Image (cartoon, rainbow, N blue to C red):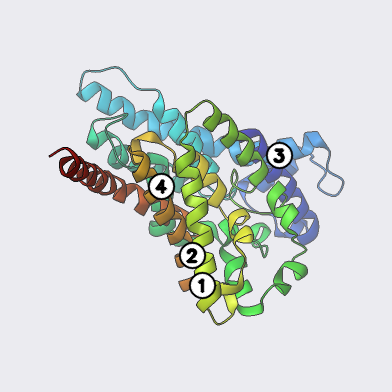
Amino acid sequence: MLAAAVVNTGYQYLHALDTAGKEHAGGWRDDFILGLGVDYQEPTIIGTTVAGLVHVVPVLIIAIMAAGVCERAFATQRDRPMDAGFILSAIVFTLLMHPAVSLFHVAFAMMFGIVFGRGVFGGEGKTFLNPALLAAAVVQISFPTAHTGHPLWDGIAGYSGTMIFSLFDESGGGVFVSADIGWWDAFIGVQQGMMGTTSTLAVALGGIILMWSRIASWRLVLGHILGLILVVSLFGAVGDGGITNLPWYWHAVLGSFAFGVVFVATDPASAASTDAGRWIQGIVAGGLVVVMRVVNPSHPDSVVTALLMGSILAPLIDYLVVGWNIRQRRRRYG
């Protein structure tokens, strides 16, 4: 996923620079890339990779450093060795960020995610919140303008699908034609978006590996997809046009849905432990993604918020499932 993030981010950056014009560049990333002599009008694979690395690597380094400082503090205070899981949290968080994100926001959000999503509960395996997901939510809620404002990244696709949902609600399917976005392009991931979430194909390949090795629960993945399809069908049946007409297969490839379901929702620490609970959590969270997009199409994708709510509900879902199983056994065996 990191490789896909580097290539697509570099490609989208150079394409946007060529379309908008060099005068729209002005940030430190722009100065650095252009200072290296990267040709944005006829980009090479090396130039594309360099442009992608300039966007991805600083965010990743700051995220790892911020997470490491907090992890070290908790390890020292509790007299235990550091757990390397904070590195994975930093990687996932980086992939959920947009290329022009402020490094200050990255550091603050990552530290918040590690402290309140991991450290205060005792560390790895003892929390019910995914630190990367919590950190991404902090960026969206505390810094709502962090995902907008850069002139080279204000395309119709928008970060995490923000603009595409609101524009589809106003203009219908013609918005895809005017933006020159096809479903296959969205599936492959050749469009603007969060650094690591645009390619549903790359996510699917990673998901197959994770489920085949039993690291990720296939029940959670299918539950989210089922919830998405059910709620889209429900809105399509009772809706009155606009965003309610957006098909489920578009919901699945736009924004961060695929990435969030495969690499975030399947985190064992923040997911339901029972098989029935995984189905329920998936259906609920997948449905919430659609509800938030339809009710408020200007909301930034809604995947982070919906999955975070699913994680919060996971312990309650497990409690109810276990209680129901106990009652069923008592009735059966007395």
Pointer 1 local density, CA inside 10 Å: few below 14, some 14–19, many at least 20: some
**Pointer 2 residue:** 231
Q: Nearer the viewer, residue 161 or 42?
A: 161
For disc 2, the neighbor class at 10 Å (few under 14, some 14 to 19, many from 20) is many
Q: Nearer the viewer, mark 3 or mark 4?
A: 4
Amino acid type of disc 4?
Answer: Trp
Residue farthest along the left direction in this orientation: 334
Residue sticking out furthest to the bottom? 240
Identify the mark nearer the N-term, 3 or 1. 3
**Callout 4: 10 Å neighbours few (<14), some, many (20+)?**
many
**74 or 3, which is in the foreground?**
3
- Read off the residue under disc 1: 235
Q: Position of residue 275 (x, y in %)?
A: 37, 39
**Gap in Å between the C-alphas at discs 1 and 2?**
6 Å
Give the structural element (helix, strand or loop) at label 2.
helix
Mark 4 lies on residue: 279
Reading the chain from its start, which is encountered first: label 3 or label 4?
3
Quadrant of res 306: bottom left
Judging from the image, what secondary structure is the residue with disc 4 in? helix
Relative placement, left or right, of 180 versus 118 is right
The residue positioned 27% from the left and 27% from the top of the image is: 73
Q: Earlier in the sequence, mark 1 or mark 4?
A: 1
